[in-house]
Image (cartoon, rainbow, N blue to C red):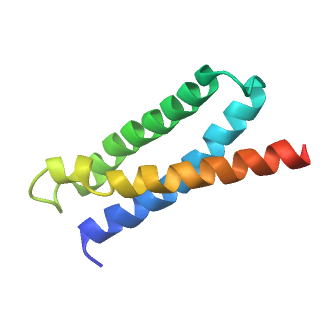
């Protein structure tokens, strides 16, 4: 598996994990009708993405020629995975807790 494909799959899994973390934080805030809750959840997703960038940059700096590819690879998949899993986990917590 090439390093670019590995980055893609790592970002997909991180999107799912950050969806769960964002849902937990949104549920703990408790005010479901405010836009601020969604903004806070999105901010958590951005923080996880940026933190993963620095970790992955250290891991793949010698394996990928263009360092900008580390930042841009899988960004759409990350957020397309984050949103449905955020909604799924948040709904499960709201219904069962």
Which residue is located at x 71 percent, y 25 percent? 33
What is the residue that sits farthest to the bottom in this orientation? 1
Relative placement, left or right, of 32 versus 14 is right
Q: Quadrant of the C terminus?
A: top right
**Residue 61 at x, y percent in the picture:** 19, 52
**Residue 40 at x, y percent in the picture:** 57, 26
Q: Observer-nearest residue: 83 or 17?
A: 83
**Residue 6 at x, y percent in the picture:** 34, 68
Relative placement, left or right, of 19 versus 11 is right
Relative placement, left or right, of 73 versus 80 is left
Q: Observer-nearest residue: 18 or 67?
A: 18
Q: Is residue 25 above or below residue 71?
A: above
How many discs appear? 0
Which residue is located at x 15 percent, y 47 percent? 68
Q: Is residue 52 above or below residue 40?
A: below
Which residue is located at x 44 percent, y 49 percent? 79
Task: Quadrant for residue 5, please give it.
Answer: bottom left
């Amino acid at each position: 598996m090439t390093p670019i494909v590995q980055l893609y799959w790592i970002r997909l899994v991180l999107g799912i994990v950050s969806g769960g973390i964002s849902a937990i934080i949104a549920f703990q805030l408790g005010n479901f009708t405010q836009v601020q809750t969604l903004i806070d959840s999105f901010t958590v997703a951005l923080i996880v993405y940026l933190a993963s960038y620095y970790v992955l940059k250290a891991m793949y700096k010698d394996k990928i020629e263009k360092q900008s590819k580390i930042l841009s690879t899988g960004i759409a998949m990350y957020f397309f995975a984050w949103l449905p899993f955020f909604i799924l986990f948040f709904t499960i917590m709201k219904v069962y807790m």
